[in-house]
Amino acid sequence: MTMEKTPPSSAVRLNQYAALDIKGADAETFLQGQTSAQVGLANGTFAPLTCFCTPKGRMLANGQLYRFATDHFRLVLHASLANDLVQHLKKFAAFYKAELTVAEHVVFAGANEPSDDLAHHLNVTLPEQPYTHATSASGTALRLPGSPRWLFMFEDEPQDVVIDSEALLNAWKLADIRSGLAWLTAAQQDQFLPQMLNWEALGGISFKKGCYTGQEVVARAHFRGQVKKRLVHARANTASLPELGASLVDESGKSLGEVVSSASSDDQHIELLAVMNTKVMEEALTVYWQETPLTLQTLPYPIERLDPEQLAAQLAQE
């Protein structure tokens, strides 16, 4: 694939994201009972990963949460989930002084390299550490987990700093894959425990907070070691991209997993994230998409619990 060059001071437009605003005097209390994050860690600098679950512990949405102002939190999530999540949460928000709205005006863009010009446009200093953000009245610069990348949220349509580019959009998705970061979509709701997307390994689950919807199931799966499916990174020698949810099988055609996301890495190869049966790794099984064998890649993080409280404290000291 021939990659386009990004003009100076530009970022690629990312329409796959949405912003859900939670405002009100009870916003923090309300969120604490609904999400896997320790909401108080969202202190205006640290932005924890989080997820929302059904009572059976299946994910309805995942994303990154940050404090926009004193009684104003913002959740970044996949655009296909935003309206459904608002309707789901409003059933519980009725008992709190909390208002939920999708911020339709927000423009999302991303850059793989730091840009002082983009920071100047937002009137912020680019955050240097992953899981952190800088916010002003003009918008937010959020440093994502994994490889150095910044997600920009403009409160108004920016001029001359955001471009549309299929090649750069693919590069952004590829960076998500190589970072082992899967964004749930509407087609995948109510299918996965958070651990199946390695969410606890990314610091997206607090096991030290109180109850939230689905918490008992999520905690039991963790402490009893009952997670039999995991997110994996794989590479294939093909130019075709599998559909979301495409089945991955062994040599006899038995299903071993499904595709969560995919992107081209060059003209002859693709890379993907998939939720697979853990016996694939334990028994070194060969996995196929259609008739194409996959080569498993190493994730950039260990599959072990990372407490967000520990992560926030560590980043605060650096």
Image: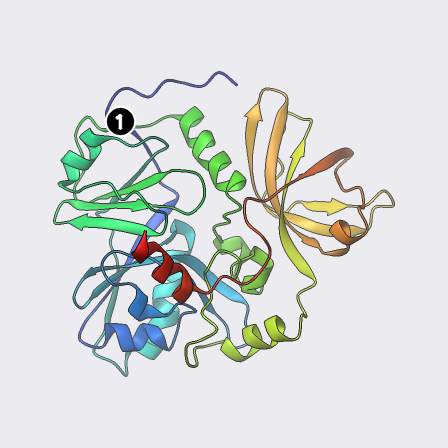
* Residue displayed at 51% across by 64% down: 59
Q: Is residue 116 above or below residue 208?
A: above
Residue 210 appears in which quarter of the rendering?
Answer: bottom left
Q: Is residue 259 above or below residue 71?
A: above
Query: In what element is the residue under mark 1?
Result: loop
* The one of 192 and 66 positioned closer to us in this rendering: 66
Residue 291 appears in which quarter of the rendering?
Answer: top right
Residue 119 appears in which quarter of the rendering?
Answer: top left
* Residue displayed at 27% across by 50% down: 133
* Residue displayed at 45% across by 69% down: 206
* The one of 176 and 311 positioned closer to us in this rendering: 311
Judge left or right: residue 249 versus residue 238: right
Residue 191 visible at all: no
Looking at this rendering, what residue extends furthest in the right direction? 252
Q: For mark 1, what is the residue?
A: 10
Q: How crowded is the residue under tag 1: few (<14 C-alpha within 10 Å), some, or many (20+)? A: some
Q: Is residue 34 above or below residue 66?
A: below
Q: Is residue 263 above or below residue 46?
A: above
Residue type beneath disc 1 = Ser
From the top left corner, tell me how far across and down residue 105 is, in percent: 21, 47
